[in-house]
Image: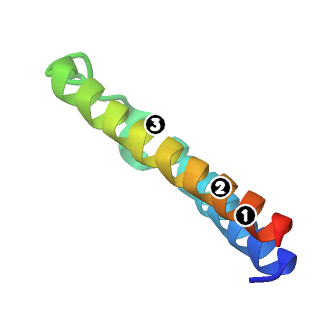
Amino acid sequence: MNMNSYYLIFTIILLIGLISTIMIGFSRKNREGDKSYFQKTRVKWVRLTAFYVIAITAGLLALLAFIISSIK
């Protein structure tokens, strides 16, 4: 893979994250407020932690692939 492929993949991931965050922020449910938001917080923390573990692992794998390809 050439360097432009990595930049393209990185840009797509950033745009997906940005668009998703904006969609969540402007959702009707979020604007109205959720009375049950502070219930079942353990499940929410586990899910959020899982998302972070997956994202960090994917980021480290992408960094490793980038470093290996730049060495060759």
- Against 26, residue 35 (above or below) is above
Residue placed most toward the observer, 13 or 3: 3
Q: Amino acid at mark 1?
A: Ile
Mark 2 residue element: helix
- Residue 37 in percent (x, y) is at 26, 23
State yes or no: discs 3 and 1 in contact (Cβ < 8 Å). no
Q: Is residue 40 above or below residue 3?
A: above
Which circle's residue, 3 or 1, is located before the other in the chain? 3
Using the rendered image of the protein, determine whether residue 18 is visible from the camera's viewpoint.
yes
At mark 1, the secondary structure is helix
The residue that disc 1 covers is 68
Q: CA distance from mark 1 to mark 2?
A: 6 Å
Q: Earlier in the sequence, mark 3 or mark 2?
A: 3
Query: Residue at coordinates 56% horizontally, 55% vertically from top-left?
Result: 61
Label 3 Cα neighbours within 10 Å, binned few <14 / some 14-19 / many ≥20? few
In whole angstroms, how far apart are the C-alphas of marks 3 and 2? 40 Å
Say whether residue 68 is left or right of residue 56: right
Outermost residue to the front: 72
Residue at image point 68% right, 62% down: 15
- Is 5 left or right of 39, judged from the image as shown? right
Q: Which mark is residue 17?
A: none
Residue receiving disc 3: 31
Across and down, in percent, residue 29 comes to 35, 42
Residue type for callout 3? Arg
* Residue corresponding to mark 2: 64
Say if mark 1 contacts mark 2, CB within 8 Å.
yes
Q: Position of residue 20 (x, y in %)?
A: 53, 55
Quarter location, residue 72: bottom right
